[in-house]
Amino acid sequence: MNKSQSKRVKILNSAKQLFLEQGYKSTSIQSIATEAGISKGAVYLYFKSKESILLSIFRMLEDKVWQQIKAIDSDSSLSPREKYRRHILTFHNEVTENLQFNQMMLSESGVELNEAFFNYAREYRYKLQKVQEATLLSIYGEQLLPWLSDVVISVGGIMQEFDTSIVLDNLTFDSEELADYIVHVTDFIVAGVVKAKTKPLFKEENIQIREAFLEKLKDDKLVAIEESMDEIARLCEETITTKENQQMLQETITMIKDALLEESLNKTLLKGLLNNLDLSPELKSAKFEFAELIGLKLN
């Protein structure tokens, strides 16, 4: 395993490999720790449970997809149509690259997915819808607005069926040909609904439900961040005995709170500040939980 990988990434990669080899249910935290070459206690510094490790694997894979989408969207040399085509390629390649992992998860029928997983799935789906809506609007213009969400859902269903055929039936498709096909099918669907002026199915209230869910996730995250900061402050008082260290940690907490109020996160500053919390095992564990909440990857 690459020595430059952070412990967190080592844990996730080790867990993913073990889940593939022996199944999610049969994999223990201890076996993950052994595979990663660290102690079981060190795993718990980063993750509360095996379920949180699994969810973080999904998010790690998702992050890679969104980074690629962001790179595509920021490439001014690409036309909106080509960006859409490359989006399709990106999502298709994610399915094929992680085929065995997806198949393993489907085979683990006894895995209990809690509310966090369902919220994650809804969040990913809604974010994907919004990206596709923006892309299709840039291709077909304002004429598509009444049916924009309908078309996104229709095309999404087609793409999902291809993904299902890959995962469940082990079918293979040429990525480039599939992307071209989806783009052409989108043309036909758009032309059809615009010409026929069919009654839109996806209503404003549906969009409001989506936006309310995403807004609630943001609010819940802000509350969780505040609670995490309160927990860190409590642990500073309970686990740190010297006045000098307590004062330093109080100043650190204040600076972290100030950094969070900035328009954009100064990740380098925050990483440096969070390193000050390594004065007790309890604080170190709380540090990683906090970093996870604000989307900061620590070594």
Image: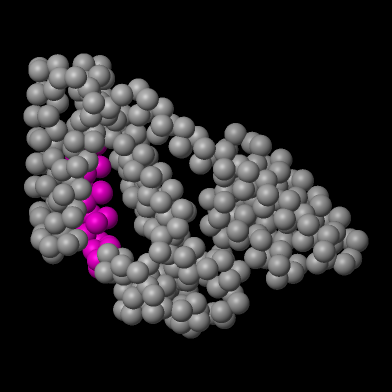
Q: Tell me, yes or no, whether the highlighted magenta stretch contains residue 88.
A: yes
13 sits left or right of 193 in the view: right
Q: Picture coordinates of residue 139 (x, y %)?
A: 21, 26
Q: Picture coordinates of residue 278 (x, y %)?
A: 71, 66
Which image quadrant is residue 87 in? top left
In the image, what residue occupies the spot 81% across and 52% down?
Answer: 250
Q: Tell me, yes or no, whether the highlighted magenta stretch contains residue 278.
A: no
The answer to whether one can see residue 101 in this image is no
Range of residues picked out in magenta = 83-103
What kind of secondary structure does the magenta stretch mostly adopt? Answer: helix
Q: Judge whether 270 appears above or below 73 on screen.
A: below
Looking at the rendered image, the quarter that the C terminus falls into is bottom right
Residue 276 vs residue 3, the one in the foreground: 276
Q: Judge whether 200 appears above or below 112 on screen.
A: above
Colour approach in the figure: one colour
265 sits left or right of 164 in the view: right
Q: Picture coordinates of residue 247 (x, y %)?
A: 86, 55
Report the number of numbered marks. Answer: 0
In the image, what residue occupies the spot 23% across and 26% down?
Answer: 201
Determine the residue located farthest toward the right in the rendered image. 243
The answer to whether one can see residue 201 in this image is yes
In the image, what residue occupies the spot 10% across and 17% down?
Answer: 195
Q: Picture coordinates of residue 297 (x, y %)?
A: 53, 57
Residue 205 vs residue 167, the one in the foreground: 205
Which image quadrant is residue 260 in? top right
Q: Judge whether 58 appears above or below 67 on screen.
A: below
Looking at the rendered image, the quarter that the N terminus falls into is bottom left
Which image quadrant is residue 209 in? top left
In the image, what residue occupies the spot 19% across and 36% down?
Answer: 154
